[in-house]
Image (cartoon, rainbow, N blue to C red):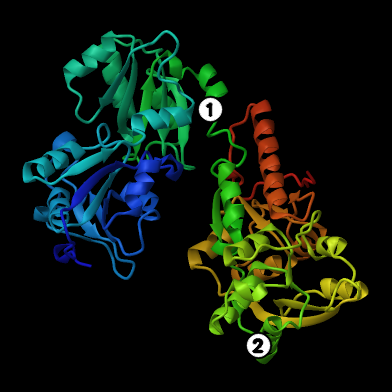
Amino acid sequence: MSPTNLPVGHGSGHVTFLGAGPGDPGLLTLRAVEALAHADVLVAEPDVLDVVRVHAPPGVTVLSADADAPGASAGLAGTGTPQLAVVDEASTTAVLPVSRDAANLVMQAARGGRRVVRAVTGDPGLDTCAAEEMLACAAAGVTFEVVPGIATAVGVPAYAGVPLRDAEGTDVRFVDARTASDRCWSEVGASDCTVVVSTTLDAVAATAGELVTGGRKPDTPLTVTVGGTTTRQRTWTATLGTIAQTLKQAKVLPSPEGGRPVIAVVGERSAAAQRERLSWFESKPLFGWKVLVPRTKEQAASLSDQLRSYGAVPHEVPTIAVEPPRTPQQMERAVKGLVTGRYEWIAFTSVNAVKAVREKFEEYGLDARAFAGIKVAAVGEQTAQALIAFGVKPDLVPSGEQSAAGLLEDWPPYDPVFDPIDRVFLPRADIATETLVAGLIELGWEVDDVTAYRTVRASPPPAETREAIKGGGFDAVLFTSSSTVRNLVGIAGKPHNVTVIACIGPATAKTAEEHGLRVDVMSPEPSVQKLAEALADFGARRRSAALEAGDPVTRPSERRPGSRRRRTTSTT
């Protein structure tokens, strides 16, 4: 939608200036999420657009405000007046002329009765020039509110393990190196306050030089953090006199990415010994690891969330695609039998089975009430959650192993006295094993084993993903079944030998080894949660070993090409 043709709403509009934090999506406030949920128009800076847009309603008009866009006019702090770009998945982003800057468009939308959310990085009162836009709204009579966010200069040091104050109440001074005057450098140089400097990676050495010239001792500790609060975060500890050499030895500079923004904290609280004890974020067991999850986003949702809690960056790659059965008549008869009382039980072995039955219900105009009087079983918590989302609470979920075998251990035998019907409806995949069918028959039940969906090999992932898999771009891959091994190798190639291979059980591990992969981690239980825990334990031990040996902590993908790796297998 063109920003010049925004739909006109009814009543007076309203603008919310919202702080989106330094980058971690979890740092959005509850009030921010609430405001986003009611937005008609979202104007966001590129760095936080993905953070905020997921909380906006589907029909929201989304615009990207880029202060560094070509043609942006000079603004406060040298950042330029934010320019607007329409975000449209079907087209490339286009920057609008200078006359259509953020303040103008925000006011235009608000005058049309729209609820506008203007999202900025960090906090509107500290990190941006949002005050200029607020003044423009006030001058035009447009009502607005401010939702504070976590300021970058505060949030990044917290994630880097650098407290800005202590019990002694040391003063804190915030400095933007781009606009700091000679007087500013002299004042902070002559004091013993903690200085938090916003600058860029290639300007850190010059910033240190300004502080030394202003009076700070060259041995004053400082930390430099790039990518703060995200899994790209990296922190270097040095002194004002050694930071240039530290960044050079770390091969950080010179670099084409020297213009990346950083937060530098200068003062005793940033000393290396203290940061080692307080660095809680970068010391997560899988911090920064790019982990390949061969599942769809829907299947991998809880697993990916768990991996993120360990500091990893999950990357979902579907290895199978789900298609309807070739002959739908069997499924249609079974669903009709479900309604007419043919079955005592229905057993769901996967989320896809729940989805297949639900879609058939919707086709016939049915809903969860059709399950009345029928006992429902689910293999595993994810399948149970899919049923609950459908409005059905399972009567039986395995108390032990989350598998068909675990379900059979809890399944009651058929009793002609208490069970008026002896038949079980089992909707499942075309390639499912016979374990559950055979077990139910042994317990005295009749089973209608129905193909509810077919699983076929998914299309290959994008070329860059395939290259990352084969070239060692991923730090680890989680295999949750033998079919995920076969299908991933089939559609994308074999993972590089530096990639950590984690398997959910012995059968999956055997398949991986048959495909020439070395298995590093094996889950102690056939559970995706336990598999993620086992990988995190592996990462924690790997990190501890590097620290004990005095080596830098690196990710598996950072190993030198061609280097040999010790063959180890974890069973914990």
Q: Give residue 192's position: percent from left, percent from top.
A: 33, 9
Which residue does the numbered mark 1 point to in the structure image?
279
Nearer to me, 376 or 20: 376
Left or right of 22? Residue 538 is right
Residue at (67% x, 37% y) in the render: 540
How many residues crowd around disc 2 within 10 Å: few (fewer than 14), some, or many (20 or more)?
some
Q: Give residue 27's position: percent from left, percent from top.
A: 42, 39
Left or right of 137? Residue 444 is right
The amino acid at mark 2 is Glu
The amino acid at mark 1 is Ser
Residue 191's place in the image compared with 9, above or below, is: above
Q: Of helix, strand and loop, which one carries label 1?
A: loop
Which residue does the numbered mark 2 point to in the structure image?
332
Residue 490 visible within the image: no
Residue at (82% x, 58% y) in the render: 506
Query: Residue 238, located in which quarter of the rendered image?
Result: top left
Residue 228's place in the image compared with 493, above or below, is: above
Q: Of helix, strand and loop, which one carries label 2?
A: helix
Q: Give residue 549's position: percent from left, percent from top.
A: 68, 28
Query: Residue 421, located in which quarter of the rendered image?
Result: bottom right
Residue 312's place in the image compared with 377, above or below, is: above
* Quarter of the image that includes the C terminus: top right
How many residues crowd around disc 1 within 10 Å: few (fewer than 14), some, or many (20 or more)?
some
Nearer to me, 472 or 429: 429
Residue 92 visible within the image: yes
- Among numbered discs 2 and 1, the one appearing first in the sequence: 1
Residue at (69% x, 57% y) in the render: 381
Residue at (61% x, 64% y) in the render: 386
Nearer to me, 492 or 422: 422
Alpha carbon distance from label 2 to label 1:
58 Å
Q: Give residue 166's position: percent from left, percent from top.
A: 44, 13
Residue 472's place in the image compared with 423, above or below, is: above
